[in-house]
Image (cartoon, helix red, strand yellow):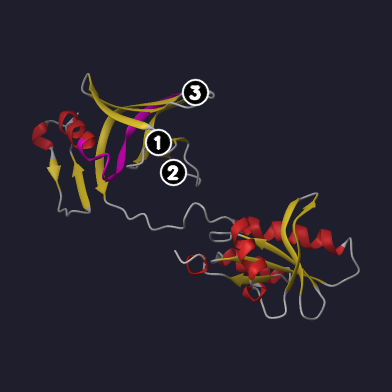
Amino acid sequence: MPTDANFKRFPSSDYFNFLSGISIRESVLELNKRKSVHTIIIYGNFEADYKGRSRSYLPQGNRVIMIKPDGTVLIHEGKKREPVNWQPPGSRVVFINKDDHLLIRSVRDRPREELLIRIKDLYFVVFLKLDATGIDSDVSEKRMVEKVLLDPSLIEEGFRPIRTEVQTPFGYIDLIGEDKDGKLVVLEFKRVTAQVDAVYQLMRYVEHMKSNTRREVRGILVAPSITDSGKIIVKRYGLEFKKINVKDLFQL
């Protein structure tokens, strides 16, 4: 375990601070001091216990922990997008020095959940000041649809909405309408970047509608942006993508 003599501070600013060769005593002081202001990235070898709605255990291993000022805790491994364990905003996080090991305890009160992380080897810590200028959490696909109902030209000139929340065996179609040529239009909305799965979802909706009507059916995916792979699938299946800037739409 590193000693105080090995505690190193790399070039930093008000927005960034990198610490390596960290003693447990120093790290606990820094972590508890900065947790309400900085997003904290910790790279180390650790195990983790979770108990609450279920019970889970992560064995010793090299992983990354992200802790945000709002109490969010995320544990990431080297694969997949989702964290292997996490705690939501509003959780209480405390850093503890126990027997020269760093413990991180995160507690959520309602419902009661606790995540205890025991770090064997602490490789480095990064403190970051991050902005919080993302899309308002109140912005949803439903609110996007409501905007289009008020101004159908957001989709295209001559578009006429017919019905929202249309049930199918594959889920609910956000909006069905009619274009200026009388073609049926199926719209799937995403408030963030549209992924391949959203394209396939739209494709299923379009195929379902085609099998239940004699009319020509178009499918439009509405989102702020779309992945490159999503563009390929859209083109392959004769679908369409409509870019809508959510920040402009809601004046964020």
Residue type at mark 2? Answer: Gly
Q: Earlier in the sequence, mark 2 or mark 3?
A: 3
Query: What secondary structure is marked by label 3?
Result: loop
Residue at image coords 47%, 27%: 110
Which percent across, then down, holds residue 164?
Answer: 73, 59
Observer-nearest of 144 and 38: 144
Which percent across, then down, holds residue 183?
Answer: 81, 74
Which percent across, then down, holds residue 225?
Answer: 54, 67
Query: What secondary structure is marked by label 2?
Result: loop
Query: What secondary structure is marked by label 1?
Result: loop
Q: Magenta span covers which residues?
A: 33-52
Q: Which residue is mark 3?
A: 52
Q: Which residue is mark 2?
A: 78
Residue type at mark 3? Answer: Gly
Where's the C terminus, which quadrant?
A: bottom left
Q: Which residue is mark 1?
A: 90
Which percent across, then down, holds residue 102?
Answer: 26, 27
